[in-house]
Image (tube, rainbow, N blue to C red):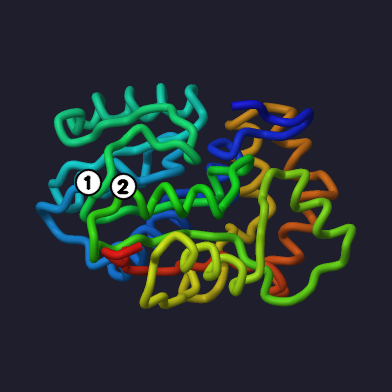
Amino acid sequence: MTVGAGRLSPSTLMAILQPWAEVAESIDERIARLADGAPGCEALWVGCGSGRSVLWWAERFGTRIEGVDPDARAIETADAAARDADLARLVTLQASDAENLPHEADVFDLTVVNMLYLSGADGREVFAQAARVARPMSVVVVLVPSWFSTPAPADAADVAKLGIRPHLLVEWKNYMREAGLVELTVEDAAHDGRWIAPEWLGLLIRGWRAARWRGVGIVLGREMRSLRKLARTRVLGLSMIRGTRWPYA
């Protein structure tokens, strides 16, 4: 995976913006409810980063889950974490292009796509792949950054520099319909709409831990200020869209 000059990898950026105990775990709980997660299902997580969500799912439901991410370093971290947690028997992880998933068609009972970890990918192609590997009539849930209103051009450019590629909800839903996903429902990823941890001090500490001075520089930079402003004012949100894989697509 290639990361632009001065840009953190999606896995590192999300570790700073969405600390597990404060943000990410509650989002995963909402995904589980929306997806009707249950023991025994075969699940795929596309855009798994360093694997925290995949490990949580395996531990919570005691079921097999595969995680895919384009960042080979993040997958190495996830593999080590799975072994440390004694979950390697349930978790399979691999580095792969999300636009060309290395799976047969009609395999998974549940497919989750987190576009925050797929900064260079085309959402239309990713959703088509997710639908291809999903069993007919199974659930596909996508986690997507969404514009709720029109941003200032400079703010939109700042968000893009961080590697976050939002679209309007209608565009994300159109991509899903084109992929053969139907019965679409939309929810906020976070109960209060806060999908980014709000405290500056916490961001700075996590930025330092993740990437030392480079991480601190990203946290203090103009791009991060724009992102936090857009999230706070609900111009930019994080949405979950649930669809059903139509069998005749």
Q: Is residue 13 above or below residue 28?
A: above
x, y percentage for residue 114?
47, 51
| Mark 1: few/some/many CA within 10 Å (<14, 14-19, 20+) | some
The x, y position of residue 8, in whole percent, is: 67, 34
Of all residues, the one furthest to the front in this rendering is: 248
- Name the foreground residue: 243 vs 197: 243
Quadrant where the N terminus sits is top right
Task: List x then y, in percent, for residue 237.
Answer: 61, 68
Question: Image quarter for residue 80?
Answer: top left
Q: Is residue 28 above or below residue 107?
A: below
Q: Which residue matches tag 2?
A: 133
Is label 2 in a helix, a strand or a loop? Answer: helix
Residue 44, placed above or below residue 22: above
Q: Residue at x 69, y 44 (%)?
A: 163
- Above or below, 213 against 16 in this view is above
Task: Name the residue tied to disc 1.
Answer: 107
